Image (tube, rainbow, N blue to C red):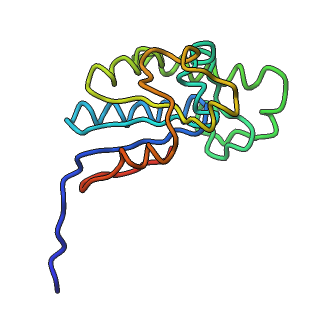
Amino acid sequence: MAQKEEYPLKKVCIICAKGTIEDVYAALIMANGAVMEGIEAKLFFTFFGLDAITKKQMDKLHTGTVGNPALRMPGGLPFPTILGMLPGVEAGVSAMMKSQMEKLDFPPVKEFLEMIVAGGGEIYACKMAADMFKIRKEDLTEEVIDIITVGRFYEMSGGQGTQIIFT
């Protein structure tokens, strides 16, 4: 049997397309973990993921309550998704999630982005999505290097030992 050659992970290119707390933090945690391990990290925010890097939206992220089958109530019981449609439920669930994250000392989105950049990570916005939502570079947090096309992102994503991760 032929021996499989393994290559060390050198670079992660993470695409964040959703603007919910859980999706944005998944991307941030993975990117921060990469830079802490000495792995090159590039974050590409597209579609609703742009909320995480837009100055006016980054502090207003919510938890997705409708259509989220993994959402649990305190005690681990499944959350009936129909409840997510009731007024105030999404805000309450989001507040609970943020409270739990604060207890675990999760940094706010802006601070997380600063930590990733300080560790050598790079942050980019998707040109197509930015154009679609009429977002300009000045609308974005200063940690964003540039607004680029997906083709440019793919060019940056090459090389042996690279993984593209979609959150």
Q: Is residue 142 above or below residue 33?
A: above
What is the x, y in percent for residue 134?
69, 25
> At x 73% / y 44%, what residue is drawn?
67
Relative to residue 9, is residue 100 drawn left or right? right
* Residue 29 in sight here: yes
Furthest-right residue in this view? 86
- Is residue 55 placed above or below 42 in the rendered structure? above
Residue at 18%, 63% in the rendered image: 6
User: What residue is rendered at 26% in x and 24% in y?
Assistant: 119
Q: Is residue 3 left or right of residue 111?
A: left
Q: Position of residue 136 (x, y in %)?
A: 60, 21
Q: Is residue 64 above or below residue 54?
A: below
* Closer to the camera in the image, 72 or 13: 13
**Which picture quadrant has residue 98?**
top right
Q: Residue at x 26, y 27 (%)?
A: 120
- Would residue 141 be found to the left or right of residue 93 on screen? left
Q: Quadrant of the N terminus?
A: bottom left
